[in-house]
Image: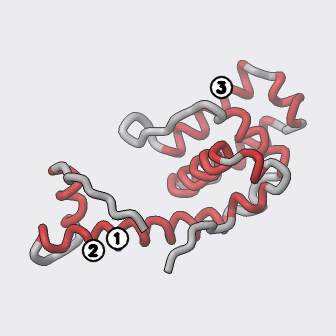
Amino acid sequence: MNNLDFTLDENIKKCLIDFHNGDYPAYYPSLMKDYILTYHNLIYRIIKELDNYFASNELYCLIDIFNSTNYSSSIVSAYNFLIGNTTDALEYEPFIIKKWEVDKNVLTKKIKQLSEFQAFGIILVMYKFWREPDRYKNNLSLLFEDTAEIA
């Protein structure tokens, strides 16, 4: 495994010690590892719960809508990003409804029922698809599987 060598800016250091009591600089590497593994496990727990939440055509529609978007939590919440971009696309690009044979009201309702963290999980699923579209295009259920090998 490759070791990453980088300098932590002050904001990252504050985040690392926000929920930790101890000798801070000495604990940064283990805190980073713990936080990353915890994040990974939490996000996959949510993602697995969302498997089969959307019908295949709805998920393909979302993947199509978000094919060239970049999410940033410093700009907008995951929920607002997901619902805003989806409703805009369904309203102003109606061909996408026909292409994927989706009911825009049903799809919008499903998104509105998501929590912030679930919306973030769906965004990550779409990013995962576009990272390797040939791998997932014929089997969307693979998107909801944890493919990282964590020892």
User: In the image, is residue 95 above or below residue 38?
Assistant: above
Q: Which mark is residue 141?
A: none
Compute the Cα span from label 3 to label 1. Answer: 38 Å
Work out which quarter of the rendered image holds the N terminus and state it.
bottom left
Label 3 sits on residue: 88
> Front-most of 20 and 27?
27
Q: Which mark is residue 33?
A: 1
Q: Is residue 42 left or right of residue 57?
A: left
Query: 46 or 3, which lies in front?
Result: 3
Q: What residue do we see at 15% from left, 76% from top?
A: 21
Give percent across and percent down for residue 101. Answer: 90, 36
Q: Residue at x 57, y 51 (%)?
A: 124
Quarter of image, res 69:
top right
Q: Secondary structure at mark 2?
A: helix
Task: Reply above or below: 9 against 47.
Answer: above
Single out the residue that lies furthest toward the front: 2
Asked whether 110 or 69 is in front, the reply is 69
Residue type at tag 2: Ser
Residue 120: give x, y in percent of width and height: 53, 51
Report the coloring of the rendering: secondary structure
Q: Position of residue 19 (x, y in %)?
A: 23, 70
Q: Nearer the observer, disc 2 or disc 3? A: 2
Image position of 21 (left or right of 57): left
Q: CA distance from mark 2 to mark 3?
A: 43 Å
- Earlier sequence position, callout 2 versus callout 3: 2
Element under disc 1: helix
Amino acid at pointer 3? Asp
Q: Which label sits in the foreground, 3 or 1?
A: 1
Can you name the residue that lies furthest to the bottom here? 151
Q: Which residue is mark 2?
A: 30
Crowd tier of the residue under label 3, counting other residues whose Cα lies within 10 Å: few below 14, some 14–19, many 20 or above: few
